[in-house]
Image (cartoon, coloured by chain):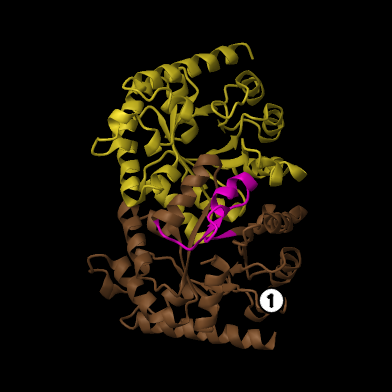
Chain colours: A brown, B yellow
Amino acid sequence: MQFYQKLNNAIESKNSRVCIGLDPVLERLPRHLQQAANPVLTFLEQVVEATQEWAAAYKPNFAYFEALGPEGLKTLEQIIEKIPADSVIIGDAKRGDVGHSAAMYAKAVFETFSCDAVTVSPYQGEDALQPFLEYEDKGTFVLCLTSNPGADDFQVPYDLYLRVAEKVKSWNVRKNCGLVVGATRPGLIQTVREVSGPMPFLIPGVGAQGGDLEETIKYASDGTAIPYVINASRSVLYASNGEDFAQNAGEAAKQLCQSINAAYKSS
Amino acid sequence: MQFYQKLNNAIESKNSRVCIGLDPVLERLPRHLQQAANPVLTFLEQVVEATQEWAAAYKPNFAYFEALGPEGLKTLEQIIEKIPADSVIIGDAKRGDVGHSAAMYAKAVFETFSCDAVTVSPYQGEDALQPFLEYEDKGTFVLCLTSNPGADDFQVPYDLYLRVAEKVKSWNVRKNCGLVVGATRPGLIQTVREVSGPMPFLIPGVGAQGGDLEETIKYASDGTAIPYVINASRSVLYASNGEDFAQNAGEAAKQLCQSINAAYKSS
């Protein structure tokens, strides 16, 4: 199935645009899980189970698994297997390399780790992204405007983020590209949307980073049913660190879903 | 030991500026190794043993190991253990993320996988790089001017690559930064050096990608003893795919070392 279709199906069937970032930090897990054979896996399995009703997508961030070494990558494989087929899996890897190395990264994320989509960096240009785009049925979200202060170093000056949006639009011949656009500068989301046209956005920065949800949704939409998803990681994963952590994660996901839908209706 | 010092020691003790990229592709390994318990590990162990006399640095590219899954990452750990302490290990990961995720990538490359240095992407700006730079004794090579055609998409227009060089110079307060500068545009290396001042360069693109060695060395140097290394991957690893592959890899490393030193003397 084409990625846009799969993403759209997930959004429609769950009536949700929530993406849940899977960023497991051993020290932040509930204390009662610390003695489990694999605390990270046990934690994430329960989070996925409790949140799946509202999760159009899950976004495991490779960094947190890599920090745990080969065993952590094994855990990543295992949790990906547990994500239901009606949620999209976005491998948040922010990869970027050239030629054969890029092809190996694409193979790693799409084949070895079975993700439906990936995040990549645009810095090295078109030929560095092509190996990802050649996977017709997989989605590639290109970093465009990130949610951190450092976006002011290179992305915003000279409108680099808009040139990225423009280029990605021109490279999107297979209709499998998307853009990562942070929620912390809603006004700029509008300019990205004007340049990109209809294309999925992956929008981080609403939860712990403080982006404005209503403004974000107002500008990310352009009146058509473009599939975008809004990511929350810590605010869902660590909604509680007691024995009720999974229930609280589910509640946080549900509330985010409802807030997004309310803002969407009024946009 | 500070990273610049470690790199300088490696270059001086071996009288070599060669960096050998470890990019193992299963299909390209010598046929007689295909039946080994771990063909990639056996191959790389023999390459490292045969080339270490001329290798100031080794640069394992994470992409090739990730494509092999958790077992591949285990192989990466094992080959890193086999690299002698007098060669520098540059984890070619081209990572880039924000906040806590960046800290986890830094932990993964520097601690979990015990690399002396890393390659990173500048796209997300200063706060995305700080978690790497906070490792005082580890080196961080920031992508500046890459060796591929796609450098023309974002790096060269508006002189983004020079703004990266300028910013990295200003962030280099702990003297642990370097730049990745491709050999395929020697003229532009000169402009990077003018902006960056003394700072190590990691220079890919000389081997299979066809960069001019003499021009590169002429422009990378500025008369002082700046430690830079020139990377070759495929031209060393796959110098032969017969039973003599390791001997041929050693010979290729030696020849590259001699060519660099000859060009350095005449520069």
In what quadrant of the picture does the C terminus of chain B appear? top right
Q: Is residue B122 above or below residue B7?
A: below
Q: Is residue A159 above or below residue A264?
A: above
Q: Is residue A257 above or below residue B101?
A: below
| Left or right side of B251 for B132 | right
Residue at mark 1: A221
| Left or right side of B77 for B135 | right
Q: Position of residue A22 (x, y in %)?
A: 43, 67
Q: Position of residue A4 (x, y in %)?
A: 57, 68
Front residue of this view, candidates B34 and B93: B34
- Residue A128: in magenta span: yes
Q: Is residue A59 above or below residue B15?
A: below
Marker count (numbered):
1
Q: Secondary structure at mark 1?
A: loop
Residue at coordinates 68% horizontally, 30% vertically from top-left?
B185
Can see residue A171?
A: yes
| Quadrant of the rendered image containing residue B264 | top right
- Residue B152: in magenta span: no
Looking at this rendering, what residue extends furthest in the front direction? A1
Amino acid on which disc 1 is placed: Ser
Stretch of the chain drawn in magenta: A113-141
| Left or right side of A31 for B229 | right
In what quadrant of the picture does the N terminus of chain B appear? top left
